Image: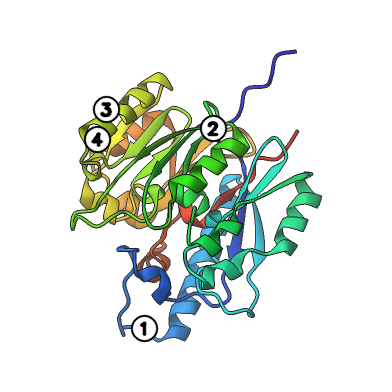
Amino acid sequence: MLSQKKQQITSHILMVRPANFGFNEETAANNAFQKNDSSLMPAEIKKKAIKEFDDFVYLLRQTGVDVTVVEDTESPFKTDAVFPNNWVTFHSDGTIITYPMYSEMRRRERREDILEKMMRQFHFNKRVHLEKSEVEEKFLEGTGSMILDREHEVVYACLSPRTDITILDEFCKATGYEKVVFNAVDGNNKEIYHTNVMMALSENFVVICMDTIKDEKERDLLLKTFKKTNKEVIKITLAQMMAFAGNMLQVKTRSGDSLLVMSEQAFLSLDKDQVRRLNQLTNLLYSPLYIIEKYGGGSARCMMAEIFAPA
């Protein structure tokens, strides 16, 4: 019997409504997207972030995306629970994989009650624990560290303090994926902490900041792999990347339409030609996430953990 073609996008999304969103000093050590100032008090930051989250969920649901929202717990205290894609991935073969996190505070985000809920609701039946490598100070932060081409079983990853190649190899061994690794730096020559801030992969195109990749062989390998897997390349600039234009996720609605989801800041950074090309390939959806982006250093894609439920 022929195996069913693997899907690249899903209409099922897990999101975690934050209880104590704020600036995390631990993650700021290597996240150049985070900014902290005294313009807002912590309570105001938290309130505004929850409003952005709720508005974003409402927009997704109104557009036809199935969003499962889980409430963050007040205790233990954690500032980044709104970004669940870093600690868990859900796979169509019934596997749930949990990941090692760089920040000690962020390790508290891994919740067995959430996983038990997903197992009951979507019939997942297998667990892979990669978080054991935290004792060795080796990290791989889910689909922050990795961009998954689920259809072709290719994983893209830029190496950084949060993306260790040996743990990436463990992921590949567990899933059968082939890795494409490279190095990427921002405009200040600082390592990019997560692959998903400079690259987004869809069914038929990739949005990527090629200017971050200095090695010619690594650039060539990426472009050859994109061509081999039939992905149209849409390049963004360093400035657009810093506006989170690489932090996008393509999902689909219950009726099967595709949506490229991003923040308002990311959308406004795009030029007319980029918008035209993207509109030819998919539908665009954006929401204001300025507070979450500023203090959390992550955007729309980081807030959504895709659920690929087993048949």
Circle nearer the N terminus (2, 3): 2
Answer with the quarter of the image where residue 132 lies. bottom right
The residue located at (63%, 63%) in the rendering is 110
Question: Mark 4 is on which residue type?
Answer: Asp
Circle nearer the N terminus (4, 2): 2
Of badges 3 and 4, nearer the viewer stands 3
Q: Which residue is mark 1?
A: 40
Q: Which residue is mark 3?
A: 220
- Residue 217 drawn above or below residue 97: above
The quadrant of the rendering that contains the N terminus is: top right
* Mark 1 neighbour density, 10 Å: few (under 14) some (14–19) many (20 or more): few
> What's the distance in space between the residues labelled 3 and 4, CA to CA?
24 Å
Q: Which mark is residue 177?
A: 2
The answer to whether the residue labelled 2 contacts the one labelled 3, judged by CB atoms less than 8 Å apart, is no
Of badges 4 and 1, nearer the viewer stands 1
Circle nearer the N terminus (4, 1): 1
The residue located at (25%, 39%) in the rendering is 210
> What's the distance in space between the residues labelled 2 and 3, CA to CA?
20 Å
Circle nearer the N terminus (3, 4): 3
Q: Which mark is residue 273?
A: 4
